[in-house]
Image (spheres, rainbow, N blue to C red):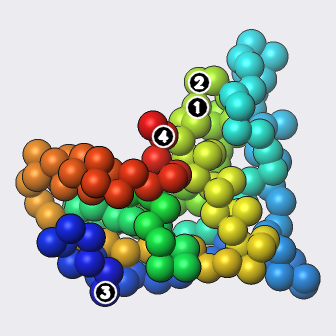
Amino acid sequence: MKVLEEYEFSFICPIEPEKDSEGKCIKKYPSSRYAKKNSHKLHSHREPFCEFSIDKKFTENTGVYIFVVFQKTKYVGICSDRTDTDHALRKRMREYGLIPPKGCYDAGRGTDCDKNKKIMECTNKGEVVELYFLEREDPKEIKNIERRIRSEINPPWNIQ
């Protein structure tokens, strides 16, 4: 458990990217598979990326999640979209952990690439990125908790 402000986050799991025999992240280069690569520009979060996911057993509920390295909160985010076919937290982690070809370009999601790179850098240095979660239902409450924590602790991986 991790307490931020008065909120008790539950430990979910370590983020474990796919690794090679030396314990380094296996490098992925998805941009070359993008069909429209000649009409779009690569964004600033350059390849390579790593791949990871979390177990499908994890919560389908919505809420606030944090990435923690050496007991320090590095990032605060939300997963507020639930579908009938997927678990909200698992879906959000998959967006970070499996960068699609389009995601490498200005038409993609730079935030996902940025967090993927940070997780890859930590893993390659032998650091463990831990995932914690605070389950909540109300989208307004979820956003307010995220904003409050971000303003109080100013996590370094959150874009300022």
Distance from disc 2 to disc 3, alpha carbons, whole Å, reads: 37 Å
Is label 4 in a helix, a strand or a loop?
loop
Quadrant, the C terminus = top left
Residue 55 appears left or right of 64: right
Residue occupied by mark 2: 107
Front disc: 2 or 3: 3
Residue occupied by mark 1: 108
Residue 27 appears left or right of 34: right
In depth, the one of 60 and 123 nearer the eye is: 123
In depth, the one of 98 and 151 nearer the eye is: 151
Front disc: 4 or 1: 4
Residue occupied by mark 4: 159
Is label 1 in a helix, a strand or a loop?
loop
Q: Residue at x 62, y 45 (%)?
A: 113
The percent position of residue 17, horizontal first and vertical second, equals 68, 72
Residue type, label 4: Ile
The answer to whether the residue labelled 4 contacts the one labelled 1, judged by CB atoms less than 8 Å apart, is no
The answer to whether the residue labelled 4 contacts the one labelled 3, judged by CB atoms less than 8 Å apart, is no
N-terminal label among 4 and 1? 1
Distance from disc 4 to disc 3, alpha carbons, whole Å, reads: 25 Å
Q: Is residue 29 visible?
A: yes
The percent position of residue 52, horizontal first and vertical second, equals 62, 68
Is label 2 in a helix, a strand or a loop?
loop
Residue occupied by mark 3: 1
Residue 45 appears left or right of 52: right
